[in-house]
Image (tube, helix red, strand yellow):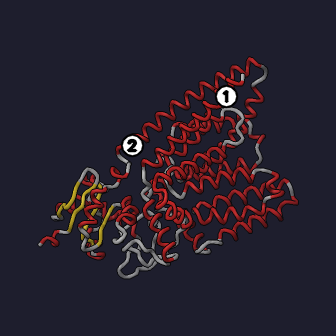
Amino acid sequence: MNLRMNKQKVLKVLFYLVIGLVVFFLAFSFIDPDFGWHLATGSLILKSGFPKTDPFSYTMPSFPFIEHEWLADIVFAKLYPLVGLLGLSVLFSTLCLSAVWISLSKFKKLKSVFFLVGISSLIPFFTVSPKVFSWLLFAIFIFAVFKDYFWKKYWLYIPLVIILWTNLHGSFSEALIILLTIVICKSFREKHLWLKGFLMTFLSFLATLINPYGFGLWKVVWQTVSDPLLKYRIAEWQPIFFNPLGLSFLTLFLFAISATLLFKYRKKFKAEMLILNVIFFVQAIFAVRNLVYWVLFDLPMVAIAVNHFYAETVKGKIREKRFLIISRFAMIFVAVIFIFQCAQIGYTYLYSHNENAWFSNGAISFLQKNPASGQIFSGYNWGGYLIWKLPEKKVFIYGMMPSWRWQENIKGESMDAMGDYLKILSGKIPYQIEFDKYNITTVLLSAQQEKASPKDILYGKLIKDNWKIEYQDSVSVILEKPNLHF
């Protein structure tokens, strides 16, 4: 018996180790396009303090620079010189795995099955990025605030967690949504708790103001979530119906199981849990990036429902054996889907999304050896990488700027850099106007832009106007303004 138990423990350890290695591989294989400017921002803050205006773009250099992930940037800047991308991949893989593990704490049965389901749902969004800090804090927060004893003994610690969350990632607003919902529902059930609950929520709101930017941080968060154009500009902000790439098959499996079991055992849950589940699900529908938060919130509820289902249906040894057989088939089914998904993503990362396939080291080397006489125009995904690898040059657009817009025109600057960028690529405005405005003499584009699709015809226009190809490989192409060669 002891030998059999030890064997099961070894198999479980191997199971979680393999999953951890898979997540690590995905983190290490693909560099997030925003990684470079996060790293550069952290280094800049450590060296000379918080910049008041944008230090990286030549299109909107006067725009107020409010970085809601500044503390995560400092973590990058401190750790990267010591441990490199390898060490950061280990750290962020651990954070991701821990977030799912905490969400599974209520599972008594089928824990391994839903661990795979949870990891599968997070993988499409997973990179070495500040958002992973938020995933872990969200899971910890959910784990804590739904414990009755936490509200009796430890509720004053909530603002401290929110201070940390506020300075790591802009999703700290989710904590206030959770708190306010719980407080309102609890106040209806327990009248004596309303004063403590609203006091704690107010203190938590004040905690969000303990950051280098004060109310300015809230302004940026509101500017982002209320931006109606963001869903047309950035894939992760698109509604889930327009961007189903984040929907893995196992996420759909989780939704089916969740909808069935939560409806069946809805009376077993407090009102605030059901309300919040709906809130996070609606958020996921309107922005696919929020799917992660619904998954992390839904998993503990599914755990409770599965435990009720098990207690209700399994009676006696015969049914226990049948349940074990069903759980094994479920594990095999989920594992096969998970392996297929990881193989597909892994292949993509290895052959088309690794650093040298997504960003060309050859192009960077060329620009370092042959400095552009004027400004460089590059694709949106290249912005953060150029800030990192070519810090002496500023960029037209990078990952922080999609919602930046001025209400009034500032001479020599853009009122909407992202809008101008998209119009240049699509030909809605003559590129010459913007290029002359900023003295752009060099253009770095993805090699795929040679195809000149209807939405991206800049390359074709440049070739027609005799811009000279100075460098080209399978990933990128660099063109220079023709009059530079006369």
- Depth check, mark 1 against mark 2: the one in front is 1
| 109 displayed left or right of 35 | right
The residue furthest bottom is 411
- Residue 165 spot, x, y in % from top left: 63, 62
| Picture layout, residue 206 above or below residue 345 | below
**Image location (x, y in percent) of residue 70:** 54, 67
Q: Amino acid at mark 2?
A: Thr
**Is 194 or 164 nearer to us in this picture?**
164
Q: Secondary structure at mark 1?
A: helix
Determine which residue is flagged by label 1: 6
**Label 2 Cα crowd, 10 Å radius (few <14 / some 14-19 / many 20+):** some
Please tell me in which quadrant of the rendered image residue 163 appears. Answer: bottom right
- Residue sitting at 51 percent across and 48 percent down? 240
- Seen from the viewer's position, the closer of residues 458 and 467 is 467
**Residues at marks 1 and 2, CA–CA distance in whole angstroms:** 38 Å
Residue toward you, 141 or 265: 141
Q: Horizontal and vertical percent for residue 111? A: 65, 35
Q: Is residue 453 visible?
A: no
Q: Secondary structure at mark 2?
A: helix
Residue 348 shows which numbered tag? 2
Give the side of residue 202 with respect to residue 375, left or right.
Answer: right
Comes first in the chain, label 1 or label 2? 1
Quarter occupied by residue 5: top right
